[in-house]
Amino acid sequence: MKLEKAIAVCRALPGATEDIKWGADLVFSVGEKMFAVTGNCADAEGISFKVDDERFLELTDRPGIIAAPYLARAKWVKIVDFKAVSDAEAAELLTRSHAIIFSKLTKKLQREIGEK
């Protein structure tokens, strides 16, 4: 996986917004709720995102993927070795992260995002 491709996937998801939080983190959100976080520079140390509860242990058992610092209790993982996943798998995981967060938004907000 290449970080640039992961960022492009996040930017292309419906209703996705991005901003800088905590001084140096590029945060992707939907409905003002985060679904992915990475560093705001070319040499970022990885990308973190939400996963389904049942996939958390499976993914963190793989080399190059760890429990995301500060967010592990919410079942977030961090890819620290960009060779750990293919571009296709990364796109699938990021799209799923977006879908998980989107599903937790109010129905009204979901409709508003869907109309844009």
Image: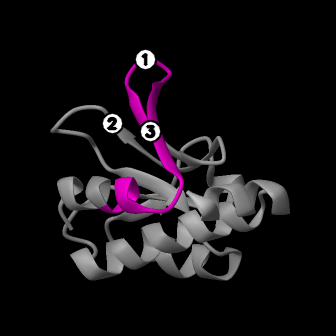
The C terminus, quarter of image: bottom right
72 to the left or right of 36: right
Amino acid type assigned to the residue bearing label 2 in the image: Gly
Q: Nearer the viewer, residue 12 or 80?
A: 12
Sort mark 2 into few (<14), some (14-19) or many (20+) by Cα contacts within 10 Å: some
The three-letter code of the residue at mark 1 reads: Gly
* Numbered badge on residue 18: 3
Element marked by disc 1: loop
**Left or right position of 25 against 40:** right
- Give the quarter of the image for residue 79: bottom left
Residue 31 is situated, as x and y percent measured from the top left of the image, at 66, 47
Foreground tag (2 vs 3): 3
The 10 Å Cα crowd at callout 3, few under 14, some 14 to 19, many 20 or more, is some
Name the image quarter holding residue 76: bottom right
Question: Quadrant location of the N terminus?
Answer: bottom left
The magenta stretch is 9-27
Q: Measured from the top left, where is residue 64 in percent x and y? A: 32, 65
Query: Is residue 34 within the magenta segment?
Result: no
Q: CA distance from mark 1 to mark 2?
A: 10 Å
Q: Which numbered tag is attached to residue 23?
A: 1
- Residue at disc 3, secondary structure: strand
Q: Earlier in the sequence, mark 2 or mark 3?
A: 3
